[in-house]
Amino acid sequence: MIVLEATVEFEPWDWIGEKAHKIIGTTEWNSYWDDFLKTLGIKPAYSGSWLISIDEINKPEIIKKIVTLTCNDDFSTENIDNSLPPFTGGYILFDNNKVLFEPQCCCDLGDLDYWKELTSLESENWHNLLMGHAMMHARKVGDNLEIKEIPEYGNHEPIIEKVNQSDLRIAISKVEQKIKSFEKTIFPIINEIYNNDELSLKISKKFTGQS
């Protein structure tokens, strides 16, 4: 079954400090990170991953920290449209629990718009998906979509997977509903900070990539 999972990236140094730099990439990383996340009552998208499903993010203290990390020094409530990005992370494409593609550098929850483009794609020519990098492309092949990722570093061969277009359309519809539910989850927490319904709703939509 095709699943598109919405995730937020937890950069380890924001959560466990400098120790992260010492153990990332070592054999102890996965178990250390998984155990740490367990203390927060959450689990990663897969062992050792920095990506956390939005289904796992519901505790006020965790949401407040993500909000604080996202509202950087350039953030201004008077200029939200230009200064406030969606939550960093993005969408993992699973097929029967196998990861086909996951967000790379500079991806966020606003990237759902690019996945939606694939639901109406009809051309056999490669279409560039403008979400983060490494580069991703897709084209229509019969009833399927052929999706290709070109690794950003090294001399690795492109990753190419085929996904049924109708199945992907259903997966996108489901994750879109999850995003709307997540917006409702974070809204009251954000409103505790700003005490302004209209402003907090706008911020919630920006964080979830809906505006």
Image (cartoon, grey):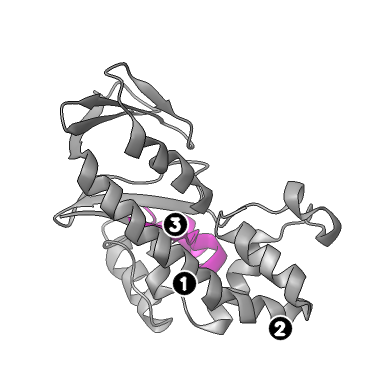
Residue 107: percent from left, percent from top: 49, 45
If the image is split into quadrants, where does the N terminus sit? bottom left
Against 152, is 112 above or below? below
Which disc is residue 192 wearing?
2
Residue 81: percent from left, percent from top: 74, 50
In the displayed structure, does residue 144 sit left or right of residue 20? Answer: left
Comparing 145 with 35, the one in front is 145
Query: Is label 1 in contact with label 3 (beta carbons under 8 Å)?
Result: no
Give the residue type that dot 1 points to: Ser
In this rendering, the label closer to the viewer, 2 or 3: 2
Queried whether the magenta region covers residue 23, the answer comes back as: yes
Secondary structure of the residue carrying numbered label 2: helix
- Residue at image position (64%, 52%) is 85
How many other residues sit within 10 Å of disc 2, few (<14), some (14-19) or many (≥20)? Answer: few
Between the residue at mark 2 and the residue at mark 3, the CA separation in whole angstroms equals: 36 Å
In this rendering, the label closer to the viewer, 1 or 3: 1
Which disc is residue 22 wearing?
3
In the displayed structure, does residue 73 sit left or right of residue 100? Answer: right
Residue 51: percent from left, percent from top: 40, 59
* Magenta residues, start to end: 5-25
How many other residues sit within 10 Å of disc 1, few (<14), some (14-19) or many (≥20)? Answer: few
- Residue at image position (45%, 74%) is 57
Looking at marks 2 and 3 on the same chain, the residue that comes earlier in the sequence is marked by 3
Against 97, is 149 above or below? above
Between the residue at mark 1 and the residue at mark 3, the CA separation in whole angstroms equals: 37 Å
In this rendering, the label closer to the viewer, 1 or 2: 1
**Mark 1 highlights which residue?**
181
